[in-house]
Amino acid sequence: MAKSLLIISRQAPWSGPNAREALDIVLAGGAFDLPIGLLFLDDGVFQLANKQNAKALQQKDLSANLQALPMFGVEDLFVCGESAATRGLDPENLSLEEARVLDAQEITSLIDRYDQVITL
């Protein structure tokens, strides 16, 4: 049986390649039916902000890739409620409605459930 993998995305979509790389890993894992989850933590929650203007920063918009996650079989999507609230985002009104909002204790339990964890 394949080992489960949790990707923790901690970078804003405009701060470098890590947000895109985390998403690419998750999409690839989903395409191969790996048990995979994605947690948006710290500035990574900015990836879920609505109405981003990536062109203004000469970046590629990640929202289409995020919306494709369920089509690739990636259904274990999580967001840190505290990270979102601290950054002025309503955790219940993010672009990925499927993402489950977690508190710190739930995040600790989540990480313990996965065999491997990659933080980007």
Image (tube, helix red, strand yellow):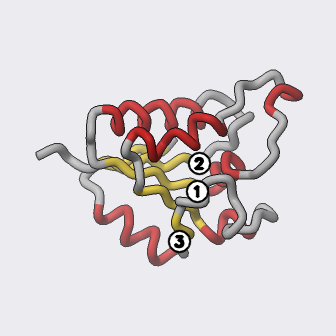
Nearer to the camera, 34 or 45: 34
At horizontal 67% and vertical 53% (from top left) the residue drawn is 95
Q: Earlier in the sequence, mark 2 or mark 3?
A: 2
Q: Residue 62: name its quadrant.
A: top right
Q: Amino acid at mark 3?
A: Leu
Asked which secondary structure carries label 1, the reply is loop
Q: Position of residue 55 (x, y in %)?
A: 83, 26
- Residue located farthest toward the top when viewing the structure as drawn: 58
Disc 1 versus disc 3: nearer the observer: 3
Q: Position of residue 28 (x, y in %)?
A: 38, 31
Asked which secondary structure carries label 2, the reply is loop
Q: Which residue is mark 1?
A: 41
- Residue located farthest toward the right when viewing the structure as drawn: 56
Nearer to the camera, 71 or 75: 71
At horizontal 69% and vertical 43% (from top left) the residue drawn is 12
How packed mark 3 is, by other alpha carbons closer than 10 Å (few <14, some 14-19, many 20 or more), is some
At horizontal 71% and vertical 50% (from top left) the residue drawn is 46
Q: Amino acid at mark 2?
A: Arg
Instruction: Say if mark 1 contacts mark 2, CB within 8 Å.
Output: yes
Q: Which residue is mark 2?
A: 10
At horizontal 88% and vertical 28% (from top left) the residue drawn is 56
Q: Which residue is mark 3?
A: 102
Q: Amino acid at mark 1?
A: Leu
